[in-house]
C-alpha cells in the first residue's frame, strides 16, 4: 500500500509507505509406511497418522535436588523417574522440528530521496535439537561452557531446585527433552537506509542516470522465546564449529551509479 498526504507538493516531497506481510502454514502426515519399518528413525518417530517431523526421545524430569543428577520419566504416564537413561522409555512427543508458521513482514518508507527499509522474518511453533548443545551443557567441554544460563542455574548444593544438572566430566550424551529447545523467533533480518540524489541539479549535470548511497545491516536483533536457548534458532543439527552457532551481524555501505 502507499500512504501520502495530498497537497501542493512535488511527488518527490511526499511520504510513502509500502508494507507487506506473508505467512505459510506447514503440516504433514504419514499416511502409509512399508510393513515392518522401525518406529524410531534417529530422533524422530515413524508411524501412520503422525507428522514425519515428530520428535521421539526420553522426557527430562528435572534435576534430583539431593545429588544434582538429571532425571527422566520412565514412561508417558510421568508417574516415576529414574537417573538411569536406559530405564526411561522413548516417547513420541507433541513437538515437531518444522515450524507451524513461517513468514515475514517488511516496510519501506520514502521521503525526499530518503528511503528506509525494515525487513523481519519469523518461524513459530517448532522445536530444535542441535549437536552444539553439548558444548554448552557437558562438563567434558567445560572450556566452552560460557553460556550464562548454565552458570546461573547449574546444581551445586543439596536441596537446590533447578533444571540444570551438576557439573561432571562424565560424558552424558543422552538425547532427551533436556536438549530440546523452543525454536520460535522473530528476526530483524535487514535494515537499510539510503539517499537518492537524482532530484538534485548537480547529478543531472554529471550526465549519470542514477546516483544513490545506502547502508545496510543484517541480523541486528532476534527475539527468541526460550530462556534456555544457547545457540541461534536457525542453526543446523550437526554443525559443531563455533562460527555456526550464531548468525553474524553484517554492515554494508555502498554507492549505486547508473551511466
Image (cartoon, rainbow, N blue to C red):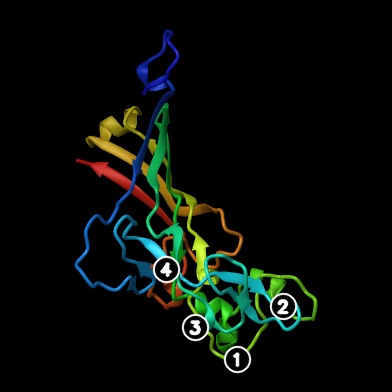
Image quadrant holding the C terminus, namely top left
- Which residue is at the front of the view, 73 or 111? 73
Tell me the CA gap for discs 4 and 1.
27 Å
Q: Earlier in the sequence, mark 4 or mark 2?
A: 4
Q: Nearer the viewer, mark 3 or mark 4?
A: 4
Q: Earlier in the sequence, mark 2 or mark 3?
A: 2
Q: What residue is at 21 percent from the left and 58 percent from the top?
A: 32
Q: Position of residue 53 (x, y in %)?
A: 35, 60
Tell me the CA gap for discs 3 and 4.
15 Å
Q: Classify mark 1: helix, strand or loop.
A: loop
Q: Which residue is mark 1?
A: 169
Q: Nearer the viewer, mark 1 or mark 3?
A: 3
Residue 155: numbered disc:
2
Q: Classify mark 3: helix, strand or loop.
A: loop
Q: Kindly check if marks 1 and 3 are in contact, taking CB atoms under 8 A apart as contact.
A: no
Q: Nearer the viewer, mark 4 or mark 1?
A: 4
Image quadrant holding the N terminus, namely top left
Tell me the CA gap for discs 2 and 1.
14 Å
Callout 4 environment at 10 Å: few (<14), some (14 to 19), or many (20+)?
A: many
Q: Which residue is mark 4?
A: 56
Residue 28: numbered disc:
none
Residue 135 position (above or below residue 237): below
Residue 250 position (above or below residue 175): above
Residue 67 position (above or below residue 16): below
Q: Classify mark 4: helix, strand or loop.
A: strand
Amino acid at each position: 500500500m502507499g500512504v501520502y498526504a495530498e497537497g501542493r507538493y512535488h511527488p518527490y516531497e511526499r511520504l510513502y509507505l509500502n508494507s507487506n506481510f506473508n505467512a505459510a502454514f506447514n503440516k504433514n502426515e504419514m499416511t502409509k509406511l512399508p510393513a515392518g519399518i522401525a518406529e524410531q528413525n534417529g530422533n524422530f518417530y515413524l508411524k501412520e497418522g503422525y507428522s514425519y517431523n515428530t520428535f521421539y526421545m526420553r522426557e527430562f524430569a528435572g534435576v534430583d535436588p539431593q545429588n544434582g543428577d538429571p532425571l527422566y520419566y520412565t514412561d508417558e504416564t510421568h508417574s516415576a523417574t529414574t537417573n538411569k537413561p536406559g530405564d526411561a522409555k522413548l516417547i513420541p512427543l507433541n513437538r515437531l522440528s518444522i515450524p507451524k508458521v513461517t513468514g515475514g513482514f517488511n516496510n519501506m518508507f520514502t521521503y525526499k530521496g530518503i528511503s528506509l527499509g525494515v525487513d523481519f522474518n519469523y518461524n513459530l511453533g517448532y522445536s530444535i535439537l542441535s549437536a552444539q548443545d553439548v558444548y554448552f551443557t557437558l562438563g567434558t567441554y567445560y572450556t566452552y561452557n560460557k553460556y550464562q544460563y548454565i552458570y546461573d542455574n547449574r546444581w551445586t548444593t543439596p536441596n537446590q531446585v533447578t533444571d540444570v544438572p551438576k557439573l561432571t566430566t562424565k560424558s552424558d550424551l543422552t538425547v532427551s527433552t533436556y536438549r530440546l529447545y523452543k525454536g520460535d523467533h522473530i528476526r530483524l533480518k535487514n535494515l537499510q537506509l539510503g539517499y537518492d540524489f537524482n532530484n538534485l541539479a548537480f547529478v543531472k549535470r554529471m550526465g549519470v542516470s542514477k546516483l544513490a548511497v545506502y547502508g545496510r545491516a543484517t541480523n541486528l536483533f532476534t527475539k527468541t522465546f526460550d530462556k534456555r536457548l544457547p545457540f541461534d534458532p536457525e542453526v543446523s543439527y550437526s554443525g559443531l564449529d563455533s562460527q555456526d552457532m550464531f548468525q553474524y551481524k553484517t554492515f554494508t555501505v555502498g554507492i549505486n551509479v547508473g551511466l
